[in-house]
Structure formats: C-alpha cells, structure tokens
C-alpha cells in the first residue's frame, strides 16, 4: 500500500503524463510515416573504434611496504611510501652507473582520440630487420577523398550596425589539406594492431608517454575543428564570432563519442538520478518546462517523456562515458580551464529549451540526426562576453537571427558566450549532440577580483594615504538621498582623491603571481582527473608496483632507483602555491568525475622540497633521472620525496619499474 507521499508523486507523474499526451496529440497525428528507404543513408566511415583501446581502473591501490614520508597531506598526516627503499650504500654504488633497465624495441603505442574518420597517414615506423626508421608519405583512401569533399562554412559575423552577415564558404579540397598539415591530426597504420596517434608537428615518435600533454590537447582540438587551423580559429573566431563547420560526407565524424542505444544502456546499468545526472525538458507556446521526477531515472519513464516530445539532457556524461571523459580531460589541457559537457537527445519536431545565452564558449558536436539552430547577436555591448547566463527570452525579445542553419551529423557549431541561441529538431529527424563548454569565469575581471584586494592590502601597508581617515562630514555629501549640489567642493575633492588613489594601486601589483596561482588552484579543483593510456598506466602507480596474486601471494617488489627517469603525468597535473603560511602542492589526479564533489586535494611540502618541484616543472615534458633532481639535503630525503609523488600518481616513469635485487 502506498503512503501519502508516494500517492502524491504518482498522481503528479500521471497527471503530467496525461497533460503532455493531450497537448501533443494533434502534433503526433499530423506526423507522416517516413519510409526508411527514403532517408538519406549516412556514410559510416572507418576509423578508430575507441578513444583508447584499453582503459585501466584508476582506483587500483597498490599497497606496498613503506618507509617514512616527508610529504604530508592537507590534514597533516604522514602517509607511508609504497616502495622498499634502497639503502644509501646501494644508491651510492648506482649513482654513476648505467641504468639496469633492459633495452626494449621501440614499439609505438596505440593512442588515438576517437573516430577521426580520416585515413591520413603521416607517421614513423620501425623496420623489424634493420631497425631503420622509415618515414611514410601521406596516403589517402577513398574514405579520405570523400572527407576532402566536405565543405566548411565560416561565419565571420561582426556586430556591425548594419547587422548583416558576412558569409564565407570554402571547399576543403585535397590540395588544401596537402599544403597545410595543421588541417589534420590523425594518422593510421596499415596494420590495425599498430594504429598510433601521430602528427607531423607535435606527437613524439615514442608515443603519448613521451609527449607534451599540451601538444596532445592541441592535436585533439585541431581534429575537433578540422579543417580550420587552430591559429586561425584563435585569431578570428575565439570570443568574437560564430563558426559553422559542415561535414556532409563525414556524418560519422563524432559518432564514436556516444549513440542513442548507449544512452539506453547507461539508464539501465547505472543509478542515473533526475536533476543530478539527467533533466527532462520541453518548450511549447513560449514556455519552457522541466519534468524531472524524484529519484532514479528509469528507462521506461525517460522514454515515455521522449515519446511525448520531451528533450533529454544528460548532465555530467563523463561519469558514465569514458570516451567523453577522455575528450574533456584532454581538452582542459588546451584551454587551461575546466571543460564541461552536456548531451542532448531531442525527439523529432520538438524543442526542449527557450532562447537564452550562456556564460561559456560553446562547441556543439552533432552526433546523430539533424537540428535547426538559430543564433542571435548580443543585444548590446554590455551583453558581449557576459559573466553569467541569461534568463529565458521570449520570441518577441530576440528579433531576427544572424545565423539560421540545420546541423547534420558530423557538423560542428561554435559560438561565444553572450550569443542568444535556440534549437529545435526538424520533422521526421531526431537529434543527438554534445555541447562542450569552456572558459567560464576565466576572464580578466576574474583575475582582477583576486589581484586588486592583494594590491589594496599591499598599498595599505606601504602608504599612509590609504590609512588616513575620510573627511569630516563625508556622509552628508554623498549618498542616494543627498543633493549633489549641496556640498560641491567636498564632493569634487573626494572624487579626485579617490581617482588618484585607485591609479596609484598600479604600483602595488606585485602579487600577480599569487593571483594567477589562485586561478590555477581553482582550475585544479575544477578539473577532471587525467585518463591514462595503457603505456602510461604501466609506468605509474595505477598499473605498476605490487600486485596481489592468487592465494594471497604478492608479486616481487619493484624499485624506484636513483637512475629511473620521471616527469609529471600532465603539464597541468599540479599547482605549487604558498597559502596561509604553508607551501602546498594542489593536484587533480584524485579528483572525482562529478564537478566539485570533493574538496581540493593538496600536499603540504617542506621548504627543502620546493626546488625539486620547480625543477620538475621546468623540465617538463622531458624525463629526468632521480639523480639529476636538485635537493639541498641528502639523497635519501630527495629519494623519499620522489617516491611520495609517485605514490600519489603525480609522477610517471619512462618505463615500468624493475624488480628489486634479491640481496635487498
């Protein structure tokens, strides 16, 4: 028997369900059956099947015998190191010796960023007979030739008084691609087992393990906006104008990220909650409604809403889709800020959201179906690059669109924050797209909000003028209820002095580094944890070290020796700051997949450890031996600090660790 709350919830759901069905009955009856044979078949291009062929469980905890730790966590607790330490005599014997690692053949890893759908080959392979490097020239399959026929429309739309749209349409020809290597970032070997991610400009021949994460992220972004070069995008469109890229011959360009059947599996296999992970919305008669229920979003309930022309928005899809996590966690290295994502599934002939503008740079990747987009210029200069999103607008408030386009599978649309937009599906076509968001609260004003209080504090300490009292009677000279003409002399003097004092703050901006550090710490807290490639996992605490075998037997202990080479896992993996009289190293390796689900993670460092961290920051992306790392005290303490960083997953080695000698 149901209690009152259950009866109420059931009644609300049933009433809402009936109301939706009644409201949309006429629409559904007017829909004409579409013959499947009449639908344009979208070309399925071959490419990489997965963002990464293999993923590893980040939550593996390789517990080992541990020594004392000189790096503490934010609670001041010392955690033990997870490796047996070599005694000092053994370390001194090895200090000037060659590395004991076995030399292995230079096998190139398979690190790919999704279904690029291009058969462009520009890589370096190793000849098995004589180990001679052979550089392959660009080769293209028939699939790639179709890709070259895709067109790109670049809408360089300015806020001119005429309000007219300047439309430049270019064909992405084969010759254009050949002449400009920046137009592609993917490569493919003839052997599917030897597929590897490589570009002529950045990717190291040894694979992602030896590359700079900033280069890898730039390559991924270049693939996303292909064939527009990254430099051109930043110069012309970034924060300035919408950009439309059409790929009518590459409908599957983004198809590896997600599909509608996968969403069904996500609902069935995960505890997807209304409001937290999923929203159900509709927009009709100028009104947007949210139809979220309480608790888990059961597939039957969600698809019932969908059948009644409701739009489904999947929030935080990286929690459930590894490929999207890989995409966003990699792109955040390029943007230097958190990259969010939402997935939108909309039934045919419907709209889920009212016209509005956002406070983020938006990249719309059309995965399936078609969607009709209308983009409107900012309403005035004060609405250009806004700090916060807008409320919903009525159709009468927004006027005529500056861009009116139907996105098809494979297309991409970018528009800056502040551009009003709305989207609806066409009759007979559903739509599945993912919106990537970047640069929220990453403007100059956000930096100055942190810097100016520091400058004012410094000015107050150094200048008595900032500490002087306000003029007597100032309360009777200023204010909403005060007549400005009552005391014009005092008003003029105070206004002029306030301007001089504000101008003098420019000489106290010595804390710009500290202000940027605060922005960096915010990014570390916002960021997704990195997704490791198989090779990276084998060389980190997540895949290396001790393993538990059958019958409670451990694998042989492994050793982080003085000749082992290490580097940071990513360029933006951590941030070294001085806060509240402490030296802290913030890091994002242990961040949750849900935004701000946990407090920031950091380590407390001693002053002796600071040169070590700065040295590793300066040397990135190069590997350095433990012996090369400077440290003011003895080697044992330095070795312990490096082991502590490896334990946290912040450092990675250039190859898997060797097993310890039996004598140790």
Image (cartoon, rainbow, N blue to C red):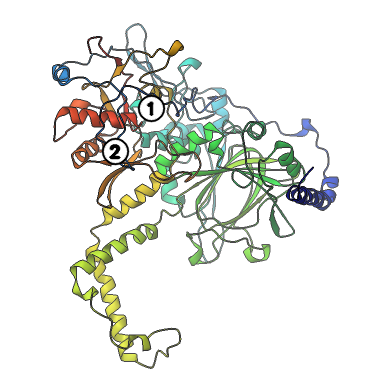
Label disc, if present, on residue 442 of the rendered structure: none
Image quadrant assignment for residue 45: top right
Tell me the quarter of the image containing the N terminus: top right
Q: Secondary structure at mark 2?
A: strand
Query: Mark 1 highlights which residue?
Result: 208
Image quadrant assignment for residue 181: top left
Residue 170 is situated, as x and y percent measured from the top left of the image, at 53, 43
Work out whether 9 lies above or below 100. below
* Residue situated in front as seen by the camera: 218 or 331: 331
**Left or right, 312 with reference to 318:** right
Q: Residue at x 27, y 22 (%)?
A: 560
Earlier residue among tags 2 and 1: 2
Label disc, if present, on residue 72 of the rendered structure: 2
Q: Would residue 191 be seen by someone viewing this image from the given angle? A: no
Q: Secondary structure at mark 1?
A: helix
Q: Would residue 570 be seen by someone viewing this image from the given angle? A: yes
């Amino acid at each position: 028997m149901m209690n009152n709350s259950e009866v109420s919830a059931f009644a609300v759901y049933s009433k809402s369900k009936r109301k939706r069905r009644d409201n949309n009955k006429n629409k559904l009856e007017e829909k004409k059956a579409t013959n499947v044979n009449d639908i344009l078949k979208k070309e399925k291009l071959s490419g990489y099947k997965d963002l990464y062929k293999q993923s590893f469980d980040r939550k593996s905890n390789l517990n080992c015998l541990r020594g004392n730790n000189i790096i503490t966590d934010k609670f001041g607790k010392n955690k033990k190191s997870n490796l047996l330490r070599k005694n000092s005599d053994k370390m001194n014997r090895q200090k000037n010796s060659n590395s004991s690692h076995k030399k292995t053949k230079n096998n190139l890893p398979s690190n790919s960023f999704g279904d690029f759908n291009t058969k462009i080959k520009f890589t370096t392979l190793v000849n098995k007979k004589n180990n001679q490097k052979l550089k392959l020239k660009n080769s293209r399959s028939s699939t790639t030739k179709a890709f070259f026929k895709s067109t790109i429309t670049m809408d360089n739309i300015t806020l001119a008084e005429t309000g007219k749209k300047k439309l430049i349409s270019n064909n992405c020809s084969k010759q254009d691609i050949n002449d400009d290597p920046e137009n592609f970032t993917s490569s493919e070997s003839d052997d599917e087992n030897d597929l590897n991610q490589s570009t002529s400009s950045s990717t190291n021949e040894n694979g992602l393990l030896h590359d700079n994460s900033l280069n890898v992220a730039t390559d991924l972004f270049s693939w996303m906006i292909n064939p527009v070069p990254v430099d051109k995008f930043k110069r012309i469109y970034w924060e300035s104008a919408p950009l439309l890229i059409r790929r009518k011959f590459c409908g599957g360009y983004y198809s590896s990220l997600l599909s509608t059947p996968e969403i069904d599996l996500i609902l069935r296999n995960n505890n997807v909650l209304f409001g937290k992970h999923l929203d159900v919305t509709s927009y009709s008669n100028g009104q947007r409604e949210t139809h979220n229920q309480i608790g888990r979003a059961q597939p039957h309930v969600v698809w019932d809403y969908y059948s009644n022309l409701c739009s489904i928005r999947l929030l935080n899809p990286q929690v459930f889709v590894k490929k999207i996590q890989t995409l966003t966690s990699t792109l955040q290295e390029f943007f230097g800020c958190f990259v969010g994502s939402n997935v939108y599934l909309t039934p045919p002939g419907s709209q889920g959201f009212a016209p509005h503008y956002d406070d983020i740079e938006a990249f719309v990747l059309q995965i399936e179906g078609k969607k009709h987009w209308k983009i409107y210029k900012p309403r005035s200069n004060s609405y250009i690059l806004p700090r916060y999103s807008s409320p919903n607008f009525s159709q009468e408030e927004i006027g005529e669109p500056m861009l009116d386009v139907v996105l098809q599978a494979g297309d991409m649309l970018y528009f800056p924050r502040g551009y009003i937009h709305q989207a609806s599906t066409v009759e007979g076509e559903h739509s599945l797209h993912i919106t990537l968001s970047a640069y929220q609260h990453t403007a100059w004003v956000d930096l100055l909000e942190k810097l100016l209080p520091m400058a004012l504090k410094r000015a107050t300490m150094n200048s008595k003028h900032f500490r002087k009292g306000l003029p007597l009677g100032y309360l009777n000279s200023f204010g909403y209820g005060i007549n400005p003409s009552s005391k014009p002399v005092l008003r003029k003097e105070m206004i002029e002095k306030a301007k001089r004092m504000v101008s003098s703050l420019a000489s106290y901006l010595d804390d710009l580094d500290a202000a940027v550090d605060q922005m960096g710490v915010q990014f570390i807290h916002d960021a997704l944890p990195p997704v490791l490639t198989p090779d990276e996992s084998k060389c980190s605490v997540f895949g290396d070290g001790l393993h538990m075998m059958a019958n409670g037997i451990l694998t042989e202990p492994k050793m982080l020796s003085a000749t082992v080479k290490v580097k940071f896992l990513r360029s933006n993996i951590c941030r070294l700051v001085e806060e509240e009289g402490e030296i802290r190293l913030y890091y994002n390796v242990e961040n949750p997949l849900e935004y701000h689900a946990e407090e920031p993670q950091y380590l407390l460092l001693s002053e002796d450890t600071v040169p070590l961290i700065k040295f590793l920051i300066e040397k990135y992306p190069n590997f350095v031996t433990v012996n090369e790392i400077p440290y003011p005290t003895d080697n044992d303490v330095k070795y312990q600090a490096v082991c502590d960083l490896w334990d946290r997953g912040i450092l990675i080695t250039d190859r898997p660790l060797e097993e310890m000698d039996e004598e140790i």
